[in-house]
Amino acid sequence: MLLLAFEHLGEAKPFLDHFNAQKAHGIYFSDGTAIYVNYGKGGLSLALNIARLSEQLKPELCVLFGLAGNLSNLNIGEVVVVNKVKLLDSSLNPILNPIEINSIKGFKNVDCLSVLGNYAFGKNLSLFADCIDMESYFFGKALNTLNIKGFIVKLISDNNKWFSKETEFDYSNAIKVINLLKQIANNNLAEIFTSTSISDLNILISLKKLFEKKRYTFTMRQNVYKKIKINTAKNIKTPFKLKYVLCEKPLKIKCDKKIDDYISYFHNLKDKCALIYAKKKGEFLRKTPKSYTPNNTYGYSIIQSYNCVYDCSYCFLKGYFKTFNPVIFKNIKDYFDAIKKTIKDDKLRPLYFYLGTFSDPVALSIFDSSY
């Protein structure tokens, strides 16, 4: 069964008509599909009811569909799949808690920002997401917390500048996506689909037949999924274009925005959109394994920056952090103090202190003369 959820009845109506769904006990039902409408009660209500219905109905897939405003370069009427969603509580600063959602190959997979409270215009939200709504984060939280297989599909409704309730949208492409997900759910293909992101039904069915014929165990299937992801991954190299500079408030550096703390911005920015200057706190040096330095020597890595401006496929930095934006720490004196203290406390000799474990300092030197 496919459990299809909507925040508003207006968003659900084209699908209720398409599936000729009939209402029973507060839920609309059609062949192989259950449709829940939250009637604008908000994200928290949506999450609670999705959790309840998932427990009752045991759907193969759970999908949220709705309208979303454009924050970047999406087109009005475009259908997108949300693969990362973040929450903006307009009473707080900044954005919190990114949640990873399943993606689908062949569709535009985007970041979405859900707003709790009033909309916050003029806050450079395009740095954090491609589209905006008020419920996706809570739906995604329910999926991840309860380990429910699911997706978020959005139709772009406006440019976050204007919106007319009389605007009519073409739902035909959205209905095609939901029909695909319905077939996947009702043919027991959800595990293969969510593990590979492959949207070709013929391939999914062939894999299912192979697993059944060979009697693949769960572990064996997971190994197949891993190989598929590796072999079908496309390394699309895009250059780093500096669009925005963020700087923590104690630092006197020219920037686009002063911030209190870099951490939540670092974890929530879209990839390759901003450079962050900050003050390092906590760990300045990290002791390295013996193999990092020449024989019979000892080393410490200086953690003065994160990430790199290049996009080399072989580099572990591509997947080490959840964001690809560089951070440069400017409290250099604290690093020298940490080095002096380590030389005094650590009696092993010779000692190496070096840069480059969590960033490429040569590449980042174009932004900062301290290198």
Image: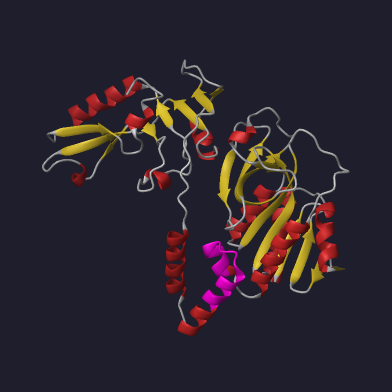
Is 193 in the magenta? yes
Q: Which residue lies furthest to the bottom in this view?
A: 213
The picture quadrant where one finds residue 105 is: bottom right
Q: Which residue lies furthest to the top in this view?
A: 252
Is any atom of residue 24 visible in this view?
no
Above/below status of 230 relative to 99: below
Q: Who's the residue at 44% across and 64% down the image? A: 226
x and y percentages locating residue 65 in the rendered image: 73, 55
Is any atom of residue 370 visible in this view?
yes
Above/below status of 257 relative to 2: above
Above/below status of 251 relative to 349: above
Which quadrant: the N terminus?
A: bottom right
Is 225 in the magenta? no
The picture quadrant where one finds residue 286 is: top left
Which quadrant: the C terminus?
A: top left
Above/below status of 336 relative to 207: above
Nearest the viewer among 263 and 321 is: 321
Nearest the viewer among 328 and 235 is: 235
What range of the chain is rendered magenta?
Answer: 191-208
The picture quadrant where one finds residue 153 is: bottom right
Q: In this view, does 309 lie to the left or right of 37?
A: left
Nearest the viewer among 202 and 95 is: 202
Q: Who's the residue at 64% across and 75% down the image? A: 187
> Which scheme is used to colour this image of the protein?
secondary structure
x and y percentages locating residue 30 in the rendered image: 80, 71
Q: Who's the residue at 23% across and 24% down the image? A: 340
Q: Is residue 362 left or right of residue 62?
A: left
Task: Report the magenta stretch's main SS.
Answer: helix
